Image: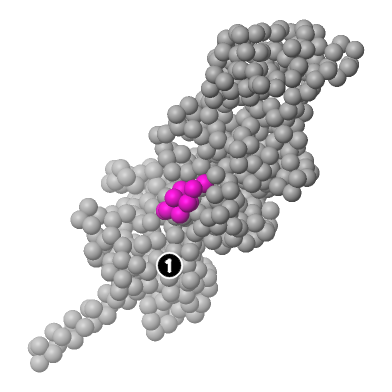
C-alpha cells in the first residue's frame, strides 16, 4: 500500500512539473482561474488570443505557478515566429539537456541563435529550471535588441530597497525594463526581488507590456531562420532616410574602422559597401557619391550589377557601364579634340599604361605617381597648368588633373593641343545592358554584385555570376554574405547570412524582394542599426560604407 501511494505521489509530482514546463501553445480560451479583476487579466487574455500562451489544462492558466526558462523563451519566440518558422529550429543544438525530443528544443535553439538567452558553462541550458525575475529582464533586453524595439522612458527611475541584490549582469536590463513600465518592483515593499522565481502571471504581464510599450523606430530588425539558414536583417522605408556613400578617410583608397565611419557620418543604419583590393584598398567596381564619379571600373560592365540611388531618392539594382569623354575647347569655343574611355581616380597599372586618368581631390591632394602628360583644370573647367614627364602633380580643389602614365601608339593630338586658358569639359553616359542609357544619372551607385533577384524571382546562376566577375568557388561555398534588396512594397532590406549565393537568392525572394544585389562580405561584413551592431563591428578596416540617416 505504501509503495502504491509513493508511486501515486511521484506520478502527481511528475504531472505537476510537466504542467509547469509545457510549451505555451496558442489558445484563446477563457481561463477559469483568471478573473476579470485580476491585475494580469488583460495580459493573459491578450497573449492567449494571439497564440503566444495557453493554459495548463482543465481550462486553467495557473497564474501563480512558476515559469521555467524554456517556457519563457517559448513565449518570446511565439511573439515573432510562425509555426512554420518554429519548425526550422527543430534540431540538436549544443546543449546536452535539450534533445530534439524536448518540447522546448526549437524555442531554445531560437533563443540561443538570436542571442536572447545563453546557456551555462557546463553545456546545459536547463530549460526546466524556474526563471528568476532578473533573468527575465535580461532576456527581454536581449529580445529588444533582437527585434529593434526601443525602451521608452515611461516611469521615473527608482532605486529598489534590494538594489544591491541585483546581479551586475542584470542591472542595465532591470533599469531599462523599469523605466519602460515592463517590469516593476513591489509597491508595498519597494523591493525588486531579483532572485525570486517568476510566476506565469508575471511572465505574461512582462511579455504583454513589452510588446505594448516598446515599439520599433522607423525600422524593423528580424533575426530568424529563412530557408533553414540563420539570417539577420533590417528593413525600413527608403523615404524615411537619406542615403549616403562614405569613403574611408574621404579618399578613394582610404582605410578606416567601421566604428569611425559610423560615428562621423551620424548613421542610423549602415552596411559595408563595395568590394575592394586588400593590397592597396582601391575599390573594385564603379562608385558614385552625390552624383560625382569617385572611381570607374568597366571591367565586367555592363553585366556588373550596382545598387543605385536615383535623384528622386528611389533605390534600384541596375546593370550598366560608365562611358566618360573629355572635350578640349579653345578660347573661341571651337572644339579641338576629344578623348574617350576616361577613368577616374586609379593607379596606372604599369609604366606603359596609357589609360587617360582623371584625378580629383577624392584621390588626394597630389597624383602620387609619375605622368607622361598631365593637364591641371580648375573648378570652372579652365586649364591652369600643363606638365610633361612630371611626378606628384597637385590636384586643385574643385577641379581635376587629366593625365596619362604613357603615350599610346596612335596617340592623337589631345594633350599636344592643350594650352593654358583653354577649357576641358567632362561628360558621362550610363549605358545599360541593352545599349540604351539609364533614365537618370545616379546620385549614388555601388558597383558590387552579383545580382541575385530580378522581378521578384531568383535571377541567374553560376553563369551570370561569372559574367559579373565572380568565380564558382567564390559564389558556391558557405560564407558570411550581405545582400541589399528592394522589396515589392518599396522598402529596403539588408540581410546577412552564412550561405552560398544561390541560397542567398532564395532567402531574398522569401523576404519579398523584387530586386537584390550582393555586397562585399566575409571579414568586411558589418551591419549597424541605431546603436546596435546587428553584425560586427569587425576589426578589418573598410574602404567604403553605405549609410542611412
Instruction: Give the quarter of the figure containing the C terminus.
Output: top right
Q: Residue at x 34, y 47 (%)?
A: 170
The residue sitting at the front extreme is 409
Q: Residue at x 55, y 57 (%)?
A: 461
Q: Nearer the viewer, residue 122 or 63?
A: 122
Q: What residue is shown with label 1?
A: 88
Relative side of 211 to 318, left or right: left
Relative side of 344 to 27, left or right: right
Instruction: Tell me residue 233's x, y (percent).
Output: 52, 52
Compared to residue 161, the image places residue 84 above or below, namely below
Q: Nearer the viewer, residue 241 or 500?
A: 500
The residue sitting at the left extreme is 2
- Magenta stretch, residue numbers: 470-478
Q: Nearer the viewer, residue 325 or 143?
A: 325
Q: Does 148 lie within the magenta span?
A: no
Q: Nearer the viewer, residue 501 or 496?
A: 501
Amino acid at each position: 500500500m505504501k509503495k502504491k501511494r509513493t508511486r501515486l505521489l511521484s506520478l502527481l509530482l511528475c504531472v505537476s512539473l510537466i504542467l509547469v514546463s509545457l510549451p505555451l501553445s496558442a489558445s484563446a480560451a477563457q481561463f477559469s482561474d483568471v478573473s476579470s479583476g485580476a491585475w494580469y487579466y488583460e495580459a493573459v487574455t491578450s497573449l492567449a488570443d494571439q497564440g503566444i500562451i495557453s493554459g495548463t489544462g482543465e481550462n486553467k492558466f495557473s497564474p501563480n505557478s512558476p515559469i521555467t526558462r524554456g517556457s519563457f523563451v517559448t513565449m518570446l519566440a511565439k511573439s515573432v515566429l510562425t509555426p512554420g518558422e518554429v519548425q526550422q529550429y527543430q534540431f540538436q543544438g549544443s546543449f546536452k539537456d535539450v534533445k530534439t525530443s524536448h518540447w522546448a528544443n526549437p524555442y531554445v535553439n531560437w533563443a540561443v541563435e538570436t542571442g536572447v538567452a545563453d546557456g551555462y558553462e557546463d553545456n546545459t541550458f536547463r530549460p526546466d529550471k524556474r526563471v528568476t525575475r532578473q533573468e527575465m529582464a535580461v532576456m527581454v533586453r536581449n529580445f529588444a535588441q533582437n527585434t529593434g524595439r526601443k525602451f521608452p522612458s515611461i516611469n521615473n527611475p527608482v532605486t529598489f530597497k534590494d538594489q544591491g541584490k541585483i546581479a551586475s549582469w542584470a542591472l542595465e536590463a532591470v533599469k531599462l525594463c523599469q523605466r519602460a513600465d515592463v517590469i516593476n518592483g513591489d509597491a508595498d515593499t519597494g523591493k525588486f526581488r531579483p532572485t525570486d522565481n517568476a510566476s506565469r502571471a508575471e511572465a505574461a504581464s512582462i511579455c504583454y507590456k513589452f510588446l505594448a510599450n516598446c515599439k520599433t523606430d522607423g525600422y524593423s530588425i528580424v533575426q530568424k531562420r529563412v530557408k533553414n539558414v540563420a539570417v539577420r536583417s533590417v528593413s525600413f522605408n527608403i523615404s524615411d532616410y537619406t542615403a549616403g556613400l562614405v569613403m574611408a578617410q574621404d579618399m578613394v583608397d582610404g582605410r578606416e574602422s567601421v566604428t569611425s565611419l559610423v560615428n562621423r557620418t551620424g548613421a542610423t543604419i549602415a552596411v559595408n559597401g563595395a568590394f575592394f583590393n586588400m593590397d592597396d584598398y582601391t575599390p573594385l567596381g564603379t562608385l558614385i557619391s552625390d552624383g560625382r564619379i569617385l572611381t570607374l571600373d568597366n571591367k565586367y560592365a555592363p553585366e556588373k550589377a550596382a545598387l543605385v540611388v536615383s535623384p528622386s531618392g528611389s533605390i534600384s539594382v541596375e546593370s550598366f557601364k560608365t562611358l566618360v569623354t573629355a572635350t578640349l575647347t579653345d578660347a573661341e569655343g571651337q572644339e579641338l579634340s576629344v578623348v574617350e574611355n576616361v577613368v577616374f581616380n586609379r593607379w596606372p597599372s604599369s609604366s606603359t599604361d596609357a589609360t587617360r586618368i582623371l584625378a580629383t581631390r577624392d584621390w588626394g591632394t597630389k597624383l602620387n605617381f609619375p605622368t607622361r602628360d598631365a593637364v591641371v583644370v580648375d573648378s570652372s573647367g579652365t586649364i591652369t597648368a600643363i606638365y610633361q614627364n612630371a611626378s606628384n602633380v597637385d590636384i586643385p580643389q574643385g577641379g581635376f588633373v587629366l593625365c596619362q602614365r604613357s603615350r599610346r601608339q596612335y596617340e592623337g593630338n589631345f594633350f599636344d593641343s592643350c594650352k593654358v586658358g583653354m577649357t576641358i569639359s567632362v561628360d558621362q553616359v550610363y549605358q545599360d545592358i541593352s545599349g540604351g542609357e539609364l533614365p537618370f544619372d545616379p546620385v549614388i551607385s555601388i558597383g558590387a554584385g552579383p545580382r541575385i533577384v530580378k522581378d521578384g524571382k531568383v535571377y541567374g546562376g553560376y553563369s551570370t555570376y561569372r559574367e559579373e566577375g565572380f568565380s564558382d568557388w567564390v559564389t558556391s561555398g558557405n560564407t558570411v554574405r550581405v545582400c541589399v534588396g528592394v522589396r515589392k512594397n518599396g522598402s529596403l532590406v539588408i540581410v546577412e547570412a552564412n550561405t552560398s549565393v544561390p541560397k542567398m537568392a532564395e532567402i531574398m525572394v522569401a523576404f519579398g524582394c523584387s530586386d537584390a544585389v550582393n555586397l562585399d562580405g566575409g571579414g568586411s561584413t558589418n551591419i549597424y542599426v541605431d546603436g546596435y551592431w546587428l553584425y560586427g563591428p569587425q576589426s578589418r578596416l573598410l574602404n567604403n560604407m553605405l549609410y542611412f540617416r
